[in-house]
Each structure stands twice: as structure tokens, then as C-alpha cells.
Amino acid sequence: MSGRLASEGGFSLLELLVAISITTVLLLIADNFVIDGTLSANIAYNKTTIQSNTKSAVENVARTIRSAKSVEATNSQPDPNPPIPANPYSWTAVAGNNATLILAVPARDTGNNLLYVDGLHSNIYTNDVIFYLDSATNRLYKRTIANAVAGNAAKTTCPPALSSSSCPPDSIIVEDIAGLSTTYLNAANVSVAVPSGTEAVGYSVTETTNIGTRSYSSTYSTITALRNK
């Protein structure tokens, strides 16, 4: 009887088990394709994100370099929160790895007009803009030390823990810094150790971050000339 039912269009138990097994295998293959596709998409997204972060950070620094009048070995404006508490002029900069970069940037009023030292407009007031690496957090920060000249639109910034309404926090430029390098170039395009006579600055940032079980790394570099010398 069972043989006749199978031959008349029904399925035997063996055929049903085979069909179920094949369907299960196909579903597992389809799931693996979906999982692999999602994983690949996530990896590509994470790579793009960290590359974009690193590029944006270096371009942020480059914009400030372009606007700078000079590169300084020490800060020219007194910092109320200096590296050495007893010395408001204790920021120092040299070329090399993980180095602080100190830029003298022209001071402007709220109308974006330059603030000149004299009526002949032969010299301008400057603010200090300092890019420094916090080794404890691997974050690159930007600090502004505003010139006390009347009409200056810039505001001095402070370490985040000491910030207030009158002293905004230093800006976080990028996190997860794994490497940072600063190069000073003179008018002959030769690398020099100290910023005196610098015409351009080379800046390179490497960012490394872990997402899940994977590590992602990105390096971006640029050489930028000072345009307000």
C-alpha cells in the first residue's frame, strides 16, 4: 500500500528527510553569505570612518598652519594653565615625534578684521594656537591662548577638566593617536630641528582603534606653507 501511495505522487519518509537536509544546507549557505556580506560591509565602513577621521584631523591642523604668521619654539602669550604651573610660558616645541606645535595666528576682531600693532599696519597682533598630544588619553587637542589686545574675538581655552563659561575647553582634534610627527621646513625646503625661519610644516598623524575583535589603523600626512608671514 505504501509503495503505491508514493508512486501516486506522495513522498516517502526518506525523500522527505533528504529534502529537509538539502533545504537546511541551502539556508546555512545563504546565512553565511549574509553574515560574510554584513561583516565585509562593516569592515569597509570602519576603515572608511577611521581614514576620514585621520584626514579631517590633519586638515584641521593644516588650515591653522596656513593662517599662521609664524611657528614658535615657546608660547608668546601667557597661558593660565601651562604645562609647568609656575611658568605661563612653558609650552615648548621642536620637530619630531609626538611634538607640540605652537603657531602664532593673526588676531582678528568680531568683524574678522586684523588687529594691527601700529597705524602703519606693518605689524599684527597674534594669538597662540597650540596642538598638543595628551599621552594619557592618546588625544590630540587644540588650545588657543588669546592676545589681551582690545577687540580680540579669540577666547583662551582651558584643559577640559578646568573649563568654564569664560574659558571653553580645548578642542579634541582626534582620538586614538598611535603616532604623530612634526617637521619644520625652511625657505630652501630643508628640514630643520627648531621652528625659527620655518616656511612650511609637515604634519603626520596615525590613528589606531579597536572595534570588536579587529584593529584599524590609518595614517595621513601633509606639508603646509605659512601664508601670513
Image: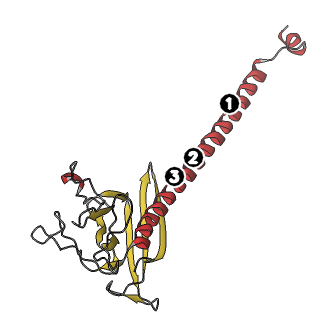
What is the CA distance from the residue labelled 2 to the residue labelled 3?
Answer: 11 Å
1 or 2: tag closer to the N-terminus: 1
In screen coordinates, is 160 left or right of 203? left
Callout 3, which amino acid?
A: Asn
Instruction: Give the structural element (helix, strand or loop) at label 1.
Output: helix
Using the image, determine if residue 217 lies above or below residue 225.
above
Classify 10 Å Cα crowding around label 1: few (below 14), some (14-19), many (20 and above).
few
Instruction: Answer yes or no: is residue 175 visible.
Output: no
Asked which quadrant contains residue 104, the reply is bottom left
Residue at (84, 14) in percent of width and height? 10
Asked which quadrant contains residue 179, the reply is bottom left
Labels in figure, total: 3
The disc label shown at residue 46, or none: 3
2 or 3: tag closer to the N-terminus: 2
Determine contact: label 1, label 3, CB under 8 Å.
no
Callout 2, which amino acid?
A: Leu
Classify 10 Å Cα crowding around label 3: few (below 14), some (14-19), many (20 and above).
some
Using the image, determine if residue 174 lies above or below residue 190.
above
Depth check, front residue: 225 or 52: 225
Instruction: Answer yes or no: is residue 198 visible.
Output: yes
Callout 1, which amino acid?
A: Thr
Classify 10 Å Cα crowding around label 2: few (below 14), some (14-19), many (20 and above).
few
1 or 3: tag closer to the N-terminus: 1
Q: Quadrant of the C terminus?
A: bottom left
Q: Which residue does the numbered mark 2 point to in the structure image?
A: 39
Question: Residue 199: x, y in percent?
Answer: 42, 83
Instruction: Give the structural element (helix, strand or loop) at label 2.
Output: helix
Instruction: Give the structural element (helix, strand or loop) at label 3.
Output: helix
Q: Which residue does the numbered mark 1 point to in the structure image?
A: 24
Looking at the image, is mark 1 or mark 2 nearer the viewer?
2
Using the image, determine if residue 195 lies above or below residue 63.
below
The residue positioned farthest toward the top in the image shown:
1
